[in-house]
Image: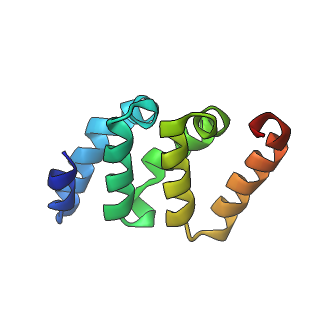
Amino acid sequence: MQCLIEMINMPEEEEELKEGIKGYVIDLAFDANGTHVLQKVLLCMKEDNIDFIYVPIMQNLIDLSMDQNGLCVVKKIISKIQNHEKKLQIANKLSEHVVHLV
């Protein structure tokens, strides 16, 4: 699957991938194999096109941060995001739950 994601180079192909996985982002993030798929998508797509991953990740950020597989996706999205406002949203949410996360 990751090899196929790397080969995507047309907007129509990106859109088809987004439509195919957008309802499964959290399931993929918690799954040992699915986490690699999401990480590859984050690596290959532009930041402007990953809101379909960013939004559900933010909604489940704390639970994902406490899971080995989910944490990998959280770390990847943190490194991918360049938008200052989105980085602040992540930092604020994590800092609100810092005691729970430790």
Residue at image coords 80%, 39%:
97
Q: Which quarter shows the C terminus? A: top right
Residue at image coords 22%, 61%:
11
Q: Would you say 56 lies left or right of 94 here? A: left
Which quarter of the figure has residue 50?
A: bottom left
**Residue 67 at x, y percent in the picture:** 57, 34
Rendered position, 94 above or below 12: above
**Residue 71 at x, y percent in the picture:** 55, 44
**Residue 27 at x, y percent in the picture:** 42, 28
Residue at image coords 39%, 57%:
42
- State the scheme by which the image is colored: rainbow
Q: Which quarter shows the N terminus? A: top left
Which quarter of the figure has residue 84?
A: bottom right
Query: In the depicted view, which residue is nearer to us: 66 or 25?
Result: 66
Residue at image coords 73%, 61%:
88
**Residue 101 at x, y percent in the picture:** 75, 38
Rendered position, 57 above or below 92: above
Q: Would you say 21 lies left or right of 57 here? A: left
